[in-house]
Image (tube, rainbow, N blue to C red):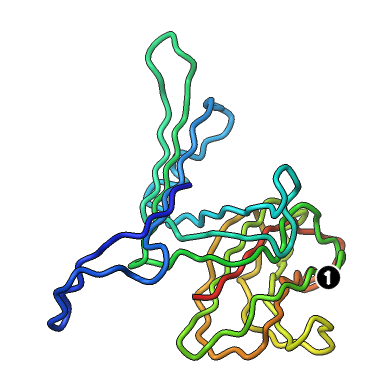
């Protein structure tokens, strides 16, 4: 993944000086590997707005955990290509690029690393992460990656907040649409001010009954 801070032209309403934007202006992700003919994803990413996330473990070689750093963006330009010269191994190439004009590069924290399935409401208990308060001039950005769902029943992932890590009472900041299959999406940003500093990703798996489970990764950032 490559992140850049560009010097950009600002020529709207008489401002014509070249200046730097606030924070990273663009991001690019690329991957190359051997092509698997049993997986047809070529059309999935063509012209799609693909959520791209990078979770960074706080300790090298360790598994990602809640509270670790996260970088994510909505790729407005995504492409998937496959093929190779005759006689060579078939390869694939995937590229995704996003920039500040479409959706700001999110820099925040991992709320759920997506390593363990949630099999009942808040089981295992969602980790509580200190993101800090969102000022009146900032927004809260959240990305969700669903990697497995055990049923076609509706499962809703909610982002909740509280003033401290005790979570004696919660405020529902936002909720993703019900998830019935593996998926990836970035929520509409939530405008500040949000005075709570602590957040968690809560999976409601009893919307239409149990048993059911969901495995998902989630991160949030403030900009």
Q: Position of residue 76 (x, y in %)?
A: 38, 57
Whether residue 173 is situated above or below residue 4 in the rendered picture: below
Whether residue 12 is situated above or below residue 180 in the rendered picture: below
Q: How many callouts does the rendering have?
A: 1
Q: Quadrant of residue 199?
A: bottom right
Q: Please identify the residue farthest to the top as the structure is shown.
A: 87
Name the residue nearer the viewer: 1 or 95. 1
Q: Position of residue 111 (x, y in %)?
A: 70, 66
Q: Quadrant of residue 118?
A: bottom right
Whether residue 193 is situated above or below residue 181 in the rendered picture: below
* Residue displayed at 15% across by 83% down: 13
Name the residue nearer the viewer: 177 or 146. 146
Q: Which residue is mark 1?
A: 122
Whether residue 109 is situated above or below residue 14 in the rendered picture: above
Q: Position of residue 94 (x, y in %)?
A: 45, 39
Q: Quadrant of residue 7?
A: bottom left
Name the residue nearer the viewer: 206 or 28. 28
* Residue displayed at 41% across by 24% down: 83
Q: Position of residue 18 (x, y in %)?
A: 20, 68
* Residue displayed at 57% across by 71% down: 221
Q: Is residue 141 left or right of residue 101?
A: right
Label 1 SS: loop
């Amino acid at each position: 993944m490559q992140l850049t801070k560009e010097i950009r032209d600002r020529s709207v309403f008489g401002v014509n000086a070249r200046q730097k934007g606030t924070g990273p202006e663009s991001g690019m992700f690329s991957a190359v590997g051997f092509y698997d003919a049993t997986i047809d994803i070529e059309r999935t990413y063509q012209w799609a707005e693909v959520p791209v996330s990078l979770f960074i473990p706080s300790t090298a070689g360790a598994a990602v955990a809640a509270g670790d750093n996260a970088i994510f963006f909505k790729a407005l330009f995504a492409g998937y290509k496959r093929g190779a010269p005759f006689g060579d191994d078939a390869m694939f190439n995937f590229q995704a690029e996003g920039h500040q004009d479409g959706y700001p590069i999110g820099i925040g924290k991992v709320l759920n690393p997506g390593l363990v399935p949630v099999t009942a409401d808040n089981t295992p208990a969602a980790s509580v992460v200190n993101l800090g308060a969102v000022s009146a001039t900032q927004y809260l950005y959240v990305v969700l990656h669903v990697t497995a769902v055990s049923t076609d029943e509706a499962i809703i992932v909610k982002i909740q907040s509280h003033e401290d890590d005790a979570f004696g009472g919660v405020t529902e900041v936002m909720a993703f649409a019900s998830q019935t299959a593996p998926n990836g999406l970035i929520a509409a940003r939530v405008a500040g001010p949000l005075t709570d500093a602590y957040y968690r990703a809560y999976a409601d798996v009893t919307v239409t009954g149990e048993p059911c489970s969901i495995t998902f990764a989630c991160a949030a950032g403030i900009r």
